[in-house]
Image (cartoon, rainbow, N blue to C red):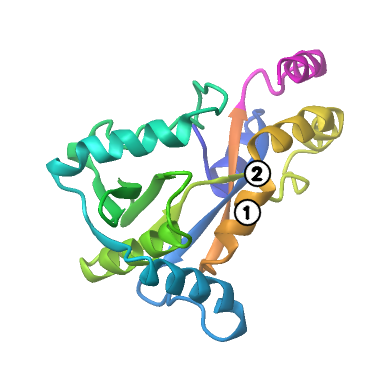
Amino acid sequence: MLVGKHVAQRAHAKGYGVIKIGEQPFFDLETWQPPRGDPGKHLRWCLNKAARAGVHIRPFATTDRHGVEDTVAAWLDGRPPVDSFLRTSPLTLAEEKRLFVAHTDRVEAVVACSPAVDGWLLEDLVRRPDAPMGATEALVIATLKQLAESGAAHAWLDVAPLRGFQSQLDSRSRLLMLAASPAVRAFDKRYGFRNLTTYLDKYHPTSWTPRYVALKPALPRVSTIRALTTLL
C-alpha cells in the first residue's frame, strides 16, 4: 500500500523503513485550469490534433465494453506481462468507478476513475497504439472537467514511479537506492518511467504528492535488490 509523507514520517518514527517510490500528480479541481500560453502550447497542439481527427469524449456505456476490451488488448500486445501495481484492468469493479472513453468510429482510449478522499483517482489510462494523436490528452482534460462539474474537489493521476526518488526521508533508503541503481535503471528502461513523468507534467497539476512504501523489517537486503535486477 502506498502512503503519503505524513504517514511515512510517523512510520519512520516507529522503526519502519520508508522508501519513496515516486510522486503523484494532484489536481485541486476548484482552482485548476488547463495550462495557457507557452506552458500549454504542446497540450493545445495535442487537443487540436484530436479534434481534427474527430475524437469525442463520453461516459462509458455498456455498449462500449467490447471496444474497451479490444483497446486494452491492443495496448498490452507485445508488452511484458505484469502482475503488480502496474497491471491494467479498467473494467474490474466497473460498477464502483466512473469510466470515460475517447472515440471516433471505435473506442480509441479509456480511463477509469476510482473513488478517493474528496475526489477521484484517474487510473488505467489506456489507448490503442494507432489512436489519433492527442486522444489521451483530450480524454484526461475532458474527464477532469466533468469530475469538477459533478462537484468533485480533487483528482489524482497515477503515480509516476521513480519521480524524485533521490529525495528520501530515511537515510537507509538513500543508501539502498544507491545500491539499487542498476535495478532502477533497468525498470526505467523497461517501462519508460521518465517518459511518463514528462507526459504527466504537460497537464500542469496543482502539485506533486510524494508516495512511499513502509517496510518492516525496515529494508530489504541489498542482495534481494541485486537478484531483482537479474530478472528485469
Residue pictured at 76% horizontal, 30% vertical? 186
Distance, label 1 to label 2, CA atoms, is 6 Å
Pointers 1 and 2 in contact (C-beta within 8 Å): yes
Q: Is residue 135 magenta?
A: no
Residue with the mark numbered 2:
193
Return the x and y of residue 86 as percentages of the image width and height.
51, 32
Q: Quadrant of residue 42?
A: bottom right
Picture residue at 54% right of the left edge, 69% below the top:
204
Q: Is residue 41 left or right of residue 127?
A: right
Percent position of residue 215, x then y: 62, 25
Q: Look at the image and give the residue range highlighted in magenta.
A: 215-232
Front in this rendered view, residue 67 or 146: 67
Residue furthest toward the bottom?
37
Label 2 element class: helix
- For the residue pair 162 and 80, the one nearer the viewer reads as 80
**Mark 2 is on which residue type?**
Phe
Q: Residue at x 61, y 83 (%)?
A: 38
**Residue 173, position in %: x, y?**
77, 34
Indicate which disc residue 37 carries: none
Which amino acid type is shown beneath numbered disc 1?
A: Thr
The residue to which callout 1 is attached is 197
Whether residue 13 is visible to the viewer of this picture, yes or no, is: no
Residue drawn at the location 52% of the way across and 57% of the way down: 25
> Outermost residue, left direction?
62
